[in-house]
């Protein structure tokens, strides 16, 4: 993001031919104290803005205007139509990057609508900055997840977090609980559903009375009671025993439950966050998970990407974890970053974190972290080059390109171009060093132009 959002400052770009109405609208906005300035031709936005259009505007031009500016104002661009919006056009505007679309005359107090969005974005921006300092990553896919996390934290809807093991589901939950602004907010209570023993009839969740089962020597509160007024995090919810699913549903619907061995209904209100690395929709289909419970827990569904989907974040995570262990900012040799960015992490961020700890523990003295700090067992095994390159991942990418209609020649060209771009990027534009890295002549890199891959959008890419 370029500039920080200035709450009461907006730019606008117009695609209107009926300028009298536009002038009136801008005047009304300005009267409410919001500064609004025209964005000139080829200028790039640095704060939130509005795109105005009317029925005379060419749809393609409006979309282009949004596409041009959206990357610079993140989610803070609103499209306002001065006439009726053509059927389906709102969706196109959203997918081009607008954060909202409305017709000026269709809302009762359009300036208030606008001001409410501006102040929400301002708050969301601050939250995003906070989240960025705790949930490390700058990739687009991670930033999109952070924006969703910030939005989710602002509501009290039940949240379902999906993601492979080690992608940060529990960490995200802690941050959502931290951002929760409920008055007198109570604790976050974590339950790992894989540890729930079916023979205890859900005592871990509901608590039990003395003598409810063998070893129940005293009355005990369960997680639901402890989470009252706070947040209940049900980790690995896909593993919740089938017999307890209706009881959990009841707590969520009615807010009431009974301790095991008791006939008294008790009340509990909490925010629910669940997580699983299973395909819960599939579990519903095959009858392992109740559909009604699934709908109840999934007010918001948030997918956390696997580390392989955001490899560009690995150097940042490495620095973050090294600093956590070493407390100092010691440099890291480029080969170490390169190796750590290329290898596979089935255990995702957790696995990277553990590997970085091993590197930090092996490190001697004050100098940079070098390849010698990588423990032997973690070094690349060049006899098995395919596994080092992540053969599965590569095969999937190639498969998608073949299905998208690319020929062998196209594939070679794409891989060659990516290799050139990676080497040039890694060497910060130094073509001589990049050429040395790739074992080719500098001239080949001089002739290289950034290429866009054209993939027929009508072909299904799975
Ligand atoms: N984006 C991140 N930034 C910093 N640390 C992270 C990030 N993602 C994960 N971690 C760290 O990685 C470790 C694993 O994260 P976490 O326990 O939240 O994953 P999980 O998805 O809940 O795993 P599991 O499904 O196995 O329970 C933790 O130590 C966490 O602090």
Image (cartoon, rainbow, N blue to C red):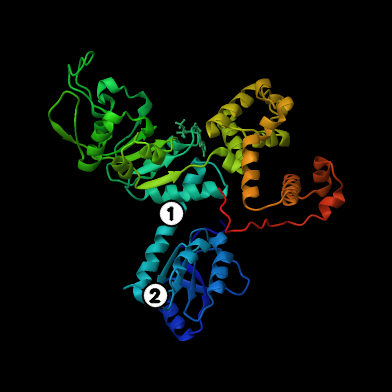
- Where is residue 60? Give x, y as percent: 56, 72
In this picture, residue 277 sits left or right of residue 401: left
The residue furthest left is 263
In this picture, residue 310 sits left or right of residue 18: right
Evaluate if marks 2 and 1 touch, with contact meaning CB atoms under 8 Å apart.
no
- Does dot 1 land on a helix, a strand or a loop? helix
Near-viewer residue (372 or 255): 255
Near-viewer residue (327 or 115): 115
| Residue occupying image coordinates x 39% and y 75% | 104
| Residue occupying image coordinates x 81% and y 49% | 431
- Where is residue 400? Give x, y as percent: 61, 47
* Relative height, residue 30 to residue 444 (above, below): below
Near-viewer residue (417 or 111): 417
* Residue at the spot of label 1: 124
- Does dot 2 land on a helix, a strand or a loop? helix
Is residue 380 something one can see in this rendering?
A: yes
Is residue 235 something one can see in this rendering?
A: no
* Relative height, residue 299 to residue 230 (above, below): below
In this picture, residue 44 sits left or right of residue 380: left
Whole-angstrom CA distance, mark 2 to mark 1, is 24 Å
* Relative height, residue 44 to residue 30 (above, below): above
Which mark sits nearer the N-terminus, 2 or 1?
2
Q: Nearer the viewer, mark 2 or mark 1?
A: 2
| Residue occupying image coordinates x 57% and y 47% | 138
- Where is residue 380? Give x, y as percent: 70, 27
Near-viewer residue (325 or 156): 156
Tag shown at residue 380: none
* Residue at the spot of label 2: 104
Q: Is mark 1 within 8 Å of ligand 1?
A: no
- Where is residue 135? Give x, y as percent: 50, 41
| Residue occupying image coordinates x 31% and y 73% | 108
């Amino acid at each position: 993001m370029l500039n920080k959002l200035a709450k009461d400052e907006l730019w606008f770009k117009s695609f209107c031919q009926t300028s009298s109405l536009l002038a009136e609208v801008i005047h009304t906005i300005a009267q409410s104290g919001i500064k609004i300035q025209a964005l000139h031709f080829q200028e790039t936005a640095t704060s939130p803005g509005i795109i105005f259009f009317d029925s005379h505007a060419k749809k393609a031009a409006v979309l282009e205007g949004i596409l041009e500016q959206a990357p610079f104002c993140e989610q803070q661009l609103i499209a306002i139509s001065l006439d009726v919006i053509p059927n389906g056009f709102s969706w196109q505007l959203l997918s081009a990057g607008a954060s909202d679309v409305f017709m000026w005359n269709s809302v009762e107090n359009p300036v208030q609508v606008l001001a409410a969005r501006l102040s929400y974005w301002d708050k969301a921006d601050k939250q995003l900055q906070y989240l960025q300092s705790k949930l490390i990553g700058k990739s687009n896919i991670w930033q999109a997840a952070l924006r969703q996390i910030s939005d989710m934290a602002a509501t009290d809807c039940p949240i379902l977090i999906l993601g492979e093991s080690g992608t940060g589901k529990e960490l995200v939950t802690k941050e959502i609980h931290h951002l929760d602004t409920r008055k007198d907010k109570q604790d976050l209570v974590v339950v790992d559903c894989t540890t729930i023993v079916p023979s205890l009839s859900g005592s871990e969740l509901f608590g039990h009375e003395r003598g409810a089962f063998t070893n129940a020597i005293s009355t005990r509160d369960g997680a639901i009671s402890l989470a009252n007024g706070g947040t209940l995090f049900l980790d690995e919810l896909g593993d919740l025993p089938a017999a307890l699913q209706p009881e959990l549903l009841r707590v969520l619907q009615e807010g009431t439950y009974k301790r095991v061995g008791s006939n008294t209904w008790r009340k509990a209100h909490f925010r629910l966050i669940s997580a699983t690395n299973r395909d819960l929709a599939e579990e519903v289909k095959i009858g392992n998970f109740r559909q009604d419970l699934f709908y109840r827990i999934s007010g918001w569904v948030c997918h956390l990407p696997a580390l392989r989907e955001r490899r560009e974040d690995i150097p940042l995570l490495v620095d973050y974890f090294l600093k956590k262990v070493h407390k100092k900012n010691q440099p890291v040799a480029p080969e170490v970053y390169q190796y750590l960015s290329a290898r596979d992490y089935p255990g995702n961020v957790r696995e990277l974190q553990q590997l970085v700890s091993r590197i930090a523990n092996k490190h001697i003295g004050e100098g940079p972290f070098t390849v010698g700090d990588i423990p032997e067992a973690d070094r690349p095994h060049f006899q098995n080059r395919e596994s080092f390159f992540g053969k599965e991942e590569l095969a999937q990418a190639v498969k998608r390109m073949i299905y998208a209609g690319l020929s062998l020649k196209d594939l070679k060209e794409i891989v060659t171009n990516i290799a050139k771009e990676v080497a040039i990027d890694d060497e910060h534009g130094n073509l001589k060093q990049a050429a040395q890295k790739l074992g080719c002549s500098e001239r080949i890199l001089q002739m290289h132009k950034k290429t866009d891959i054209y993939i027929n959008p009508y072909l299904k890419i799975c």
